[in-house]
Image (cartoon, helix red, strand yellow):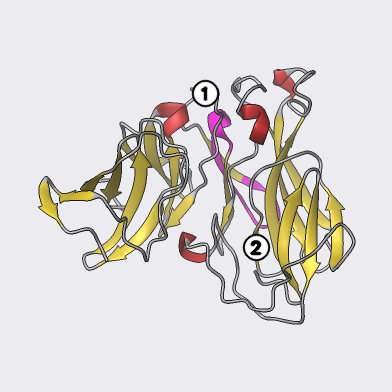
Amino acid sequence: MRLHNLTAALVLGLSILVLATPFVAAADWPQFRGPGGRGQSSQTGLPTKWDAETKVVWKTELPGPGASCPVTLGDQIFLTCYSGYGVDESNPGDANQLQRHLLCLNAADGRILWNVQQPSTQKEGAYQGFTALHGYASSTPAVDADAVYVFYGASGAAAYSHDGRQQWLTSCGTDTHEWGSANSPVLYENLVIINASVESRALIALDKKSGRETWRQGDMEMSWSTPALVKTGGGWELVAQVKGKILGLDPATGEPLGRYQRLGTIPAQRHRPPDQSPAGLKATRNGRPRACPD
């Protein structure tokens, strides 16, 4: 994260906490699991111990809870949370009052620079069971030089300018599930790719500038994971998990490129990092067996 003398932004309940380290320059953290979705950082000297007071540079109260991760671009931090419904399971309130928040904070001092609310456009699943464990802001934003992109489940995907102006809002389906929705946007060239397995059983690519649908791949059954981009000998491949298998797709067109049979049933976690082989998989490319990628 490019936070100068700040290293880690942690969402804790209704606040965001930033810890201090020596001055270190680092890259932006623009999406779920960071650059390339690898969950890796070159930054060193990170704190391994902290508490509510020790090594805290600043702590900022948020409008509500959230289970998404912060992302960074330059000296700005972007993250989501929700309010209006679903804070107390014993008394969740009126679901019609649910709204999501996209916030931008100054990384140096934690000031909230802007807070944009998006009321729910569709009824979400009830605040109970597994949904109550993570709530309604579990999808991590993605940011690039042009905009910030979010996915709000049944209320759709949206893009915002860096100063908080909504550029578009597009529905990706209106179905819900008792486990909720949590998949995060993936950016590829001019596309925002959304795993809308819960909302429409589809993987959907939207145009970054207009929000219009570019391609759709169906049969995304029971998938609560975020797809990843993998560089292969033939170019980029979009890898997505669904029940019982892992799919390889052309990220530009959605055309199927490969299918990896896998053990297990429901992919509720992200697959292995793109630079590691999916060990133990039986792989086929366009219906023909092939070796698993190295």
Q: Nearer the viewer, residue 223 or 52?
A: 52
The picture quadrant where one finds residue 246 is top left
The picture quadrant where one finds residue 266 is top left
Relative placement, left or right, of 217 versus 36 is left
First-in-chain label (2 vs 1):
2
The picture quadrant where one finds residue 105 is bottom right
Image label count: 2
Q: Residue 33 at x, y = what percent?
A: 54, 58
Report whether residue 13 is seen: yes
Report whether residue 136 is seen: no
Above or below residue 292? Residue 22 is below
Above or below residue 294? Residue 188 is above
Q: Which residues are magenta?
A: 152-166
Q: Which residue is mark 2?
A: 72
Identity of the amino acid at label 2? Thr
Q: Is residue 6 magenta?
A: no
Residue at image coords 52%, 46%:
184
Above or below residue 290? Residue 13 is above
Residue at the limit of the structure toward the left, as seen here = 288
Q: Nearer the viewer, residue 170 or 80?
A: 80
Residue at image coords 69%, 78%:
45
